[in-house]
Amino acid sequence: MPLLKDGVEVSDDQWVRVDDDADLPEDCHALISMSRWLAERDTLLTRNKPIGVALESSDNPDAIMDDLDRFGLIEVDFPLFKDGRGFSYGRLIRDRGGYTGELRARGAVLVDQLFYLARCGYDAVDGDARITEAAWAEANSRFSEVYQSTGDGRKSVLQKRHAG
């Protein structure tokens, strides 16, 4: 699957996914499950290389809210295109948690969802081959007005109406 970050296709991913039962390599950016982070947190805090955490759609992001500044990457799984929990997770992590690192959507993400992913705080997508730089640009310029406010700084139609 292609990795697209900030609308630019990235040829190589610096993050290495590490299974829960595998030894953690010391020489790379390691991406681990949330359950592994919670089980081995104290040991992982001593690591000198960047660490990322992967959330499954059934994970509760509240469990890592106090540790968000420890992660260089948070990856959220979208198991089905119609499973919207990942959008909520993005908003929670960015808006309530104040996370400023890379927030990546992975899995069954459709081109039609790119605009909404960006509005929810995602800056990277690891998904379908149809997700290209052109698709990202088109999706994020499709709508000139928005109805909901998010952390992206765009004012909603209601906010604009009441501002003047």
Image (cartoon, rainbow, N blue to C red):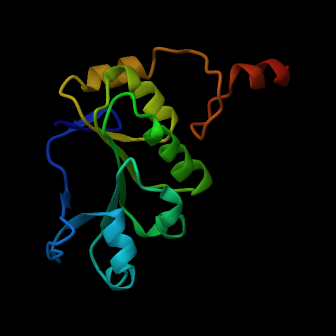
Residue 117 in the image: state x and y as whole percent. 44, 33
Residue 24 in the image: state x and y as whole percent. 18, 75
Residue 80 in the image: state x and y as whole percent. 32, 33
Quadrant for the C terminus, please. Answer: top right
For residue 17, above or below residue 81? below
- Give the residue at the far front of this rendering: 58
For residue 44, above or below residue 156? below
Would residue 65 be found to the left or right of residue 55 on screen?
right
For residue 151, above or below residue 159? below
Residue at (84% x, 22% y) in the render = 162
Q: In this figure, what is the number of numbered marks?
A: 0
Residue at (48% x, 55% y) in the render = 100
Would residue 49 be found to the left or right of residue 88 on screen?
left
Quadrant of the rendered image containing residue 128: top left
Residue at (51% x, 33% y) in the render = 119
Quadrant of the rendered image containing residue 129: top left
Would residue 97 be found to the left or right of residue 132 on screen?
right
Would residue 45 be found to the left or right of residue 145 on screen?
left
Quadrant of the rendered image containing residue 55: bottom left
Residue at (19% x, 59% y) in the render = 17
Quadrant for the N terminus, please. Answer: top left
